[in-house]
Image (cartoon, rainbow, N blue to C red):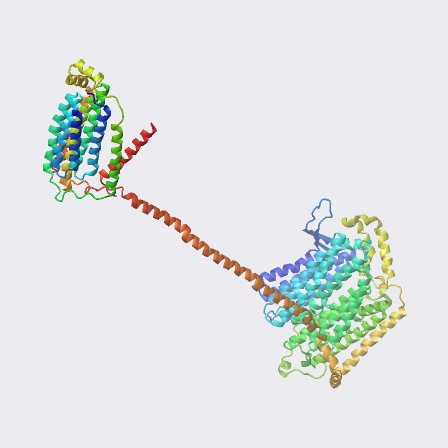
Amino acid sequence: MSDFLWLIPIFPAIGFLVNGLAGRRISKRAVSAVACGVVLVSFVLSCAAVVQLATMPSDGRYMENRVAPWVPAVEDGGGAPGLAIDWLFVLDPLSAVMILIVTGVGSLIHIYSVGYMWEEAGYWRYFAYLNLFMAMMLTLVLGGSLAVMFVGWEGVGLCSYLLIGFFYWKQDCADAGRKAFITNRIGDLAFVIGALTLFASFGTLEFRGILSAVVAGQGSVFLLTAVALCLFVGACGKSAQIPLYVWLPDAMAGPTPVSALIHAATMVTAGVYMVCRLAPLYMQAPLALTIIAIVGCATAIFAATIGLAQNDIKKVLAYSTVSQLGYMFLAAGVGAFGAAIFHLMTHAFFKALLFLGSGAVIHALHHEQDMMKMGGLRKLLPVTYAVFLCGWVAIAGVPLTAGFFSKDEILWRTFLFSPVMWGIAAFTALLTAFYMTRLMGLTFWGKSRMDHHTEAHVHEVPGVMKWPLMILAGLALVGGFLSIPAALGGSAMPFTLERWLEPVFEPGTYATAAGGHAAIGEHAAAAGDAASAAHEAAAATPHGSPHGEEHSLALEYGLMAFSSVLAIFVLWWGYGLYDRMPQKLAAWKARFASVHEVLANKYWVDELYDALVIQNFYRLCRAALAFDVRVVDGVVHMVRNVTVGTSYLSVFWDTWVVDGLVNLLAKVVRVASRGLRRFQTGVPQSYATVMVFGLFVLICVYMYLS
Amino acid sequence: MMFYLLASVCLGSAMMVVTRKNPVHAALFLVLAFFCVAGIYVILSAEFLAAVQILVYAGGILVLFLFVIMLVPLEPEGMRKPVRTARNVAWSLLSALLVAGVLMTFFRGAQPVGQGGSVDTLVAYGGNIEAVGMELYRRYLLPFEIASILLLVAMIGAVVLARRQV
Amino acid sequence: MPIPVNHLLSFSLVLFIIGMIGVLTRRNAIIVLMGIELMLNAANVNFVAFSRMHGDLAGQIFAVFNIVIAAGEVAVGLAIIIALYRNKDTINVDEISIMKG
């Protein structure tokens, strides 16, 4: 199987080519079949690959597929070898989790899209882009080096742009796509700087090589911290953290399944994946991890507050996504990489579910997205309501749902790191529960605020959209059991995600590979000692080892209970509020009007960016335009004038000199001939005269000479 | 002495020939010139040649001239006054130069004529005619014959050219 | 009294020149022919003078032939003039300029 890893991203790529080139001409059924089919094939292949991985011993779960060289190695003759990149795909426990999420949730969303996008123009284009996105995302997670990962990284950014701006004739969609792409790009710049610094230090971009070198002690803490922060900025762009999160809410202009897939389940998680992939590196740079934790925490609460005051159903979910991503980075920042990935997985389930559910609502209401115009849909859309309930309880963290297990693990690990941050994170969880309840309330409970025309046409989703929703609802409820924490008996379970992912974050895993990579050769002997030293060092820092040992069980139970109670209380209280007492809400809104104003306007961050950055950038652009028009065009005009002038010279030369010479020649001949013609008198006597003359001259000459 | 007299008469009549408007006058002056030349031949002890000169030139050629002059009428308007054309100017120049040359020749010193072999030849052959005859029919027989053929050809040519075209 | 040969030569030269002047100047074709005769005669005088100087009869012989040639040439020339007169009705050499230009 390791030789066929490359097939996993290739199938969606084939789907992209087929739909992209021929999609316009084949029927919608064919397009759907191709698009969903290739993703399902990838899913099956991914399952097969993961199964095979699982059969390998737990400390050696690693499959490599080096397909072909991309930038071939060049012998430098004495110096360090130049940049050599291979098309390298790697499967280890972490990427296994990722490909299952991507292909699994991805195929569900593809099937859902068949129903959602059926009446839209450019059906084939949508699926072509979606398949391309899948191919790129799979390249990203299967990539064995920063280079291959970056190909996927850029590719998903491109697809995000294409899909957000799918309805390209609408100005706000086009603008949103552009905003997403540019904001991503800013992060990508930092990513590239980090990656190339790593290459300069360690001579390779492959993960194994880099991590072996890091674990063996190469690279100063300063260097590693700088690199880690650069890469994290790239992750901020991709995963919408402060300050580069502004594109995600605007991205909701795209079709809802796109929001579900790209902006909830997969693309935005790429940043988290990258940080976790390079976990040993981050563990050598504790300052970077602390900064990540702070940024994650801040983003979580910041986005949650904004989500409280949004009226667009998708915008609420968007800010919720930003907030949950903040949680993931918080987890990574406190050293709980496994928890971060676990939350990534559960979030993929319930957020995709919520987005698809909102898609069902929007679809039913004929593209009405303003929650203020909804209400009372509980009776009208029973299936949608049911799945929404599942998502609601999952995200709030009601015990035994998927969200409960993953969020609780993060809260516990945060508490171990810093109780203050735990407080903030717990408050954020409260806010999360509240705004989700608000969403449910405005949409499904209470009296209907829809206009009659829309209400008359409300209809439940078709089957093709229903089944993915139900599968996701099921996963949202039970997915948490994949990783029961040790405190609740997880050690007894045959499988927990934490245990499965452990080897990936353990520095020791990379120490053994140190000898096999050319760039790190000289440290091979000391690798073993250095690795264990790194391990102890990591354990000694406040970030704790990935294992999360040495804690008090009672404390953990207590915190767990506390957050559960909090969540359930908010849900129950909110239900009462929204279902039966909407007037109380109006009163509160009036009292806190100024606060509401700030939150509804998202703290005017976009306006701030616009004033600080964008306007200045436009000024620069206008200056460049002025330069181009005046200087560059001026040079061109000058050249033109010079040419015209010299052409006049040419004309003059040609008319007077060249033609003049020719005419002169003719004139000379004419004049000479006129003169010479007079000799031809036709009278022999004149000829004879001339002859006598000549004879006389000859005689004189002869006489002179002799 | 005789020679100079004859020479000047000859030159004078030659001038007349060239300048007379009336061709008959010119022809008569030409006859005079011929006679003078014949006289000069006699002075130079070429008696045969003198006789031939008179016979052929004065008697034949000149008569021919006169015949043709009679056949061809004069131009009614006659000779125009000579204008200073380029030809005439060139001409004058040339003649001036030639005169200069002539004078140079005249005043150059040279050996006198009248001594030498010709007297002996004369004595040997007993007179000019015999001498010429001897030379002509012995050494120069071929040219003589050719000359006769030439005369024949000329005669035929003249007849052909001058006949009335039918 | 022997005559200096240069006198004879100069005489013949002048005669020749006169004849040439006549040839080149006169428009009447007959007068032109007369000029030619004068030139031939001058050449004859030259021959005879040198013959006398060298004591060689070749000069006189040649002079005889010269006379013969002159006679033939005059005959043909006059025949041409007559033919010319018949065709062009003029013997003015200036007017017979078909080869002009």
Residue A82 visible to the viewer? yes
Residue A73 in the image: state x and y as whole percent: 70, 48
Q: In this view of the protein, which residue sits in the foreground, A350 or B143?
A: B143
Residue A79 in the image: state x and y as whole percent: 73, 46
Residue C96 in the image: state x and y as whole percent: 19, 41
Judged left or right of residue A242, residue A564 is right
Which residue appears farthest toward the top when viewing the image? B124
Where the C terminus of chain A falls, by quadrant? top left
Where the N terminus of chain A falls, by quadrant? bottom right
Q: In this view of the protein, which residue sits in the foreground, C81 or A317?
A: C81
* Vertical placement of residue A548 versus A510, above or below: below
* Vertical placement of residue A201 versus A300, above or below: above
Q: Residue at x 71, y 56 (%)?
A: A147
Residue C72 visible to the viewer? no
Residue B165 in the image: state x and y as whole percent: 12, 38
- To which quarter of the image does residue B63 belong? top left
Q: In this view of the protein, which residue sits in the foreground, A103 or A638?
A: A638
- To which quarter of the image does residue A538 belong? bottom right
- To which quarter of the image does residue A533 belong? bottom right
Q: In this view of the protein, which residue sits in the foreground, A46 or A650?
A: A650
* Vertical placement of residue A97 versus C19, above or below: below
Judged left or right of residue B140, residue B24 is left
